[in-house]
Every structure is written in C-alpha cells, then in structure tokens.
Image (cartoon, helix red, strand yellow):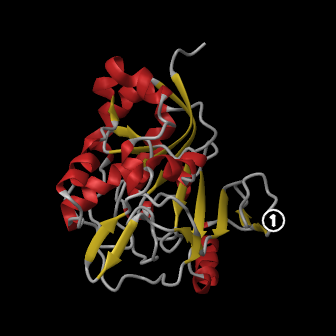
Amino acid sequence: MSDRIFIDRLEFYITNVCNLTCDGCNRYNNYHFKGWQAWDDYAEDLERWAKRIEIRHPVILGGEPLLNPDIVKWIQGINRLWPEHSGVQVQSNGTRIDRVRGLYDVLTNGNWIGISIHNPDDREEIFSRIRNIMKHPIKETADRDHPIGSDYQFVDANRKYIHCWMSDKFVQSNIMESEGRYRLYDSDPVRAHENCTFRRFKNYHWIRGRIYKCGPVALMPEFDQQHQFDISDEDRELMYAYRGLSIDEFDTRGQHFLATIDDVIPQCKFCPEDYVYKPITFSDRKKSWRISTEIL
C-alpha cells in the first residue's frame, strides 16, 4: 500500500502565454501575461514529488499549453512519474492542435486532449484541425451525457480521444480593469471561499515547483510583477504572503498544507463573493503573440 498522499486531480499549469483574448479569463491569459515553464527546469523536483504524492487525474493547462515548446516532454514526463494515473488530460483551446510535432504520438496510456471552444465561430475550424491529426476512420459523436461530460467526442482508428466543450461562458475573473488600471476585490473571504468554483471543483495547481490551493492565489503576485495592481501596500503584502508548498518543505509542512488545502485563506478576499457565469463577449486571436523566452 502506498504511503504517498493521494490527490484526485492536480493541474500542472505550464504557461501564461495564450493566443486568445477571452475576456474574463480567470488566469489572466487574455492580457499580455508572459512566462512558461521548461520541463528540464523542474524534472528533478517532479521526481521527488512523485515519491510523495499520488495523482489520479493529472491535467496540463495554461494559458495555451500547446504553445509551450516542451508540451510533449511534459506529457511524457508525467506519464513516467505517475504511471498509475487514469490518463493525462491536456486542456487546450484547440487552435494549434495540428501544429505540434509529436503530440499525436503521446496520446497513449489513456492520455487525451480536452478542447474548450470559447468562440462558437471557431468550432468548424477546430473540428477540421482535429480531423487533420487523427487517423481515419474517425468516430464523431455529440453526447453531453458521455462519462467525461464533453459536448462532442472524436475517437480515431487507433483509439485516441479528443473531447470538446462549448465553453462560451466564464466565471468572472478577480481582476477588474479600468483605463489600464488593474484592481482586485475586497470581499468577505469566507463568503468568497464558499462560492468559489476553484474550491468546489478542487482545482489545485502545480506552478513553478509548488502546489497551490488555486490558480489566482499563485498567479496574482506574478501578474503584479508584470503589470502592477492598483492596490494598497497592505493588500500587496497580504497577496504575497501566501506560500505554495515546495518539495523541499514537504517534511515540515506538507501533511498540514494538503490536509487544510480546502480551507479559507485570507487571500480569498481578493476574489468576488458571488460568482456569475458571463458570456465571453470577446474571444479573438491576438494580433501579435509570441512565446516569451524568459522563464520567469
């Protein structure tokens, strides 16, 4: 019996870079948010993590993970380190699915791609790109009651899977932008936590070697370093005070951190108290985007 700590779902967030501008993105990828994670920079740490935690559902996301030059290495590496998993899910916007060399070949051992289609006008283009990489004959079904819960499924001759969701609504981000200024909420942290979708779906994040309770608490300081929030010195100190769990700290705080990861934290005040699903009113290709070679 394994003495590792079990985590049902862990999301490996590997890039801030995205080529879409979906308003309301709760990981801030609609802005010029740079930085991505190279596999080799974290491979040794991940070897150590694999001895401490067991993951049933590993997910790779961003940003747009297919823009990370090391995406194939990430899939292969997670497969090797956590062979007991149910399959690595790569969550993508689908716009570059047929442009990544080697991607199809690593869709083995239950690995699959999930595509969130944020702009209905992109649907047929993305479906065409999917058909470009899959081997015929391809079985296509529109079945919202599928066990994974996707709206549309593709299965090819080699039993490789791609699932699609029509995701044209977002829960609003905790960033409020006005005239080039970026502000955060000042909420009752208990109420914000009670209604938080990250908490409800247990969207724990692994980012830059550490495990975090959610995406926003990990990414707010990084966004602040690049764009600077219009907040008080006191709130900025609080924002930076949360520390994700590193593997070096596992012996001293790992058990407690993971046992209390679902509890409210003071930084919950920066998120809205009432989460509302809003239509994505603007989702387009960025006129100019590039993968930053700076590993922040």
Residue drawn at (42%, 82%) of the image: 285
Q: Nearer the viewer, residue 199 or 283?
A: 199
- Secondary structure beneath label 1: loop
Question: Residue 23: horizontal and vertical position, in percent?
Answer: 45, 77
Q: Nearer the viewer, residue 161 or 104?
A: 161
Quadrant assignment for the C terminus = bottom left
Q: Nearer the viewer, residue 69 or 292?
A: 292
41 sits left or right of 135 in the view: left
Question: Residue 66: horizontal and vertical position, in percent?
Answer: 44, 63
Quadrant assignment for the N terminus = top right
Residue drawn at (37%, 82%) of the image: 286
At label 1, counting other C-alpha atoms closer than 10 Å, the crowd grade (few under 14, some 14-19, many 20 or more) is: few
Task: Tell me which corner region of the image, top left, top right, bottom left or bottom right, holds residue 19.
Answer: bottom left
Q: Can residue 218 be seen at all in this image of the molecule?
A: yes
Residue drawn at (45%, 68%) of the image: 25
Question: Residue 80: horizontal and vertical position, in percent?
Answer: 48, 34
37 sits left or right of 80 in the view: left
**Is 87 drawn above or below residue 147 in the view shown?**
above
Question: Residue 115: horizontal and vertical position, in percent?
Answer: 59, 65
Task: Tell me which corner region of the image, top left, top right, bottom left or bottom right, holds residue 29.
Answer: bottom left
Instruction: Please give the residue where the numbered disc 1 appears in the rendered image.
Output: 143
